[in-house]
Amino acid sequence: MSTKLNLTLSVWRQPGPEARGQFVTYPANGIPDDASFLEMLDMVNEQLIEQGELPIEFPHDCREGICGTCGVMINGRAHGQERGTATCQLHMRKFSDGDTIVIEPWRAAAFPVVRDLVVDRSPLDKIIEAGGFISAPTGTAPDANEIPVPKEVADSAMDAAACIGCGACVAACPNSAAQLFTSAKLWHLNSLPQGQAERFRRTEAMVETMESFFGSCTNHGECTEACPKEISQDFIAYMNRDYMKSLVYNRRLAGQR
Amino acid sequence: MLPDSNVPEGPMADKWENHKFNIKLVNPANKRRFTVLVVGSGLAGSSAAATLAELGYNVEVFTFHDSPRRAHSISAQGGINAAKNYRNDGDSVYRLFYDTVKGGDFRSREANVHRLAEVSVDIIDQCTAQGVPFAREYGGLLDNRSFGGAQVSRTFYARGQTGQQLLLGAYQQMMRQVGEGKVKLHTRMEMLELVTKDGEAKGIVCRNLTTGEITSHAGHAVVLATGGYGNVFYLSTNAMACNATAAWRAHRNGAYFANPCYTQIHPTCIPASDEFQSKLTLMSESLRNDGRIWVPRDPDETRPADQIPESDRYYYLEEKYPSFGNLVPRDVASRNAKTVVDQGQGVGPLKNGVYLDFADAINRDGKDKIEERYGNLFQMYERITGEDPYAVPMRIYPATHYTMGGLWVDYNLMTTIPGLYAAGEANFSDHGANRLGASALMQGLADGYFVLPYTIGDYLAPKLGEEPLSVDDPAFIQAEADVQGRIQRFLSIGGTRSPEHFHRELGKLVWEHIGMARDRNGLEKAITEIRALRDEFWADVRVLGESETLNSSIEKAGRVADFFELAELMARDALDREESCGGHFRVESQTEEGEAKRDDVNFANVSAWEWHDENTAQTKHIEQLDFVEVKPTQRSYK
């Protein structure tokens, strides 16, 4: 059977986007070590409600590490200390009795706090909207086996496509850059034969939209460290290469307006 | 009266083609004069929104998530079926149709299922063109696997993340239309009421989950793609926010709810470990291809699994079903797990699971091969349980996974309210009483990409020139006031228990009485107890804070309130259906060997329930199911 932990939480509470926030300390006693991190927060919230205090708002949904909704800074690290693990998949057996856990929302100017631990990540959707797709209107597709895709290419596209859009890369980056997110989508689409027609148009549009919201990359590598899907920062290099090319390919001819 | 199901005339294979020709069209230049509201952004919602916008309609999409990509379709692991016959193993549209009708235990509408099988091939083409990174072979062609006991390899997959990749494909197509200005996207907006006038759907009322603002939205048609109601069980593989409120609000406004008792209990989930458990995690069904399921023969067994000799192990599926073995359909696998656990043979600290053992597969194929096939699942299992499945057998137990019941729709996917459509898991669907593996993704995308965009034109065409109802119309004003009133009521009760508490208690009742096995006594008891708990909820729920901000307690309270009414209808439907079929197992109706026994004379039909008010039980309407192509037989997997 599980053992029980007594913990102290220091949680960022902020009533609204414009309001001033602060850390508030809560005891979290008798937490079974089989519980997930979010179930621990559930238990604390039930206790708060019982005491007539507002529960802590935190982002979560599938609790299987795939929807990308959850994500908080745990002791200063995005999704906590366990590698390749989203917050919802982190379990309390990774903590020790008596620990103090500091819990904050994602830290990035592009992700303003909505309330407590919940932030607004809509700029990530803006990047996809700018070009994160292959234009394939319904009904126009040829037979799926008409375009062979080498297994290696399909596999590496899948490695990049595994991104869950949680924003941990941004939160972990000292510059709040979104290069890992953007480059993962770009490599997924740019590496496939189906994605070639729009390759450079897509790259320029997505990179420039990204730049309008987020900071710049200076190769710290914190993004890959924090990524729950361990997406490689090599994709950033591929993106930079394609972006340079795109400035040439997309350039208008002299005299064109 | 139940409206006509609008199944077209003619031979089965020609119905859909003929229907597409016969229904009314909207001229390309006129499509922009229509607005369609799509609620939900999962596979069905995103694909419908993208396709409708490509056709030229104005589309507004509503999702309660912060991004449409978070819809629960994203969690689907295993794959998507399509009758491509790329393996040359004898698959065909007819075989997929046949398997789906039979797998659904002869409780689905044949014409719908045939259409589903027909468009399945287009889905794979469509998704591949979008760049969905399906698994491939070294020659560069698409790979397939056999899934969930199918006798052919027709399942396409993208590692263990097929749902994610298909959803991202549909989401990206939709975001392209957002960029083009054809789709207006409303995130963090939860639909809380359907607005009708003169019997037709005119729009919806939503709450902005960030600011609490209540707003009205009008359109020429409304599409509900809001998923299933599995969370009525509290513990399920659904995401935490999955709920039935949108569908239930439609039901209360006149949409009939069909077959609510058809719920699917998935056999391979990680068993609950304690009271605090918030959800159950699915382990893909593909594991049953290599894992062997067993329990100790002796209920008092204390030895660890690897020290129990073969002779003391009970491989119950292999013994009872020699030809299908561990690959029997979901309902059969789940029921048998319940039987052995109820007999006290369960394993694990709470004796609430069965072993799924990979030792033989690891000996046969090597650990590397197993890791390549299931590495991500084994890792997920290890994180959750703290046990290493390469060394000790996994423990699994069935959990609620999918709901075959839902809003009744005709062949055009229109509900009993003209102008209101339901797509994906939200409708009562093509899966009958039991859904086959890798068919949910297929159905969601079939509805969204290839069915709804055609059929909706038939309703819209005659409405050319009509403006959407003004949001100042009394119908909208009244609906907004109702929504406000309900929220204020939650805030003013000032009780002692959280909405979460009531949800958990409701879930226990539903699991116990309307779970894997149902009988008259239990169901009657369930109705009484659900009502009592509902009364307690409305008298004692504690919702703190205010409405003009992010307040997850308000969201939760509204969803739980609707689950109470839905749970009661589930019990009533299960009580009324005095037969066993697929996921609905009435203890009173079983064969001598303990298998589900259908009653085709009295129950080869769809039960569609009509709402009256809180104090009056719903009335039942019947749609008779005719089986022209596939003659009902007793399913046998021996």
Image: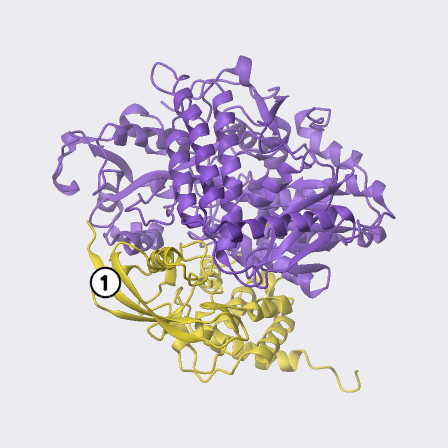
Chain colours: A yellow, B purple
Label tally: 1
Looking at this view, name the residue that lies furthest to the bottom: A254
Q: Is residue A58 visible?
A: yes
Q: Position of residue B117 (x, y in %)?
A: 59, 35
Q: Which residue type does callout 1 highlight?
A: Asn
Q: Position of residue A99 (x, y in %)?
A: 24, 69
- Badge 1 density bin: few <14, some 14–19, many ≥20, Cα 10 Å: some
Q: Quadrant of residue B530?
A: top left
| For residue A23, side relative to residue B119 (left or right) | left
From what the image shows, is residue B115 above or below residue A31?
A: above
Q: Position of residue B114 (x, y in %)?
A: 61, 31
Query: Which chain letter matches label 1?
Result: A
Under tag 1, what secondary structure? Answer: strand
Q: Position of residue B68 (x, y in %)?
A: 57, 58
Q: Nearer the viewer, residue B209 or B151?
A: B209
From what the image shows, is residue B533 above or below residue B10?
A: below
| For residue B36, side relative to residue A223 (left or right) | right
Q: Residue at x 48, y 37 (%)?
A: B535
Q: Nearer the viewer, residue B476 or B226?
A: B476
Q: Quadrant of residue B323?
A: top left
The residue singled out by tag 1 in the image is A6
| For residue B43, side relative to residue B370 (left or right) | right
Q: Quadrant of the C terminus of chain A?
A: bottom right
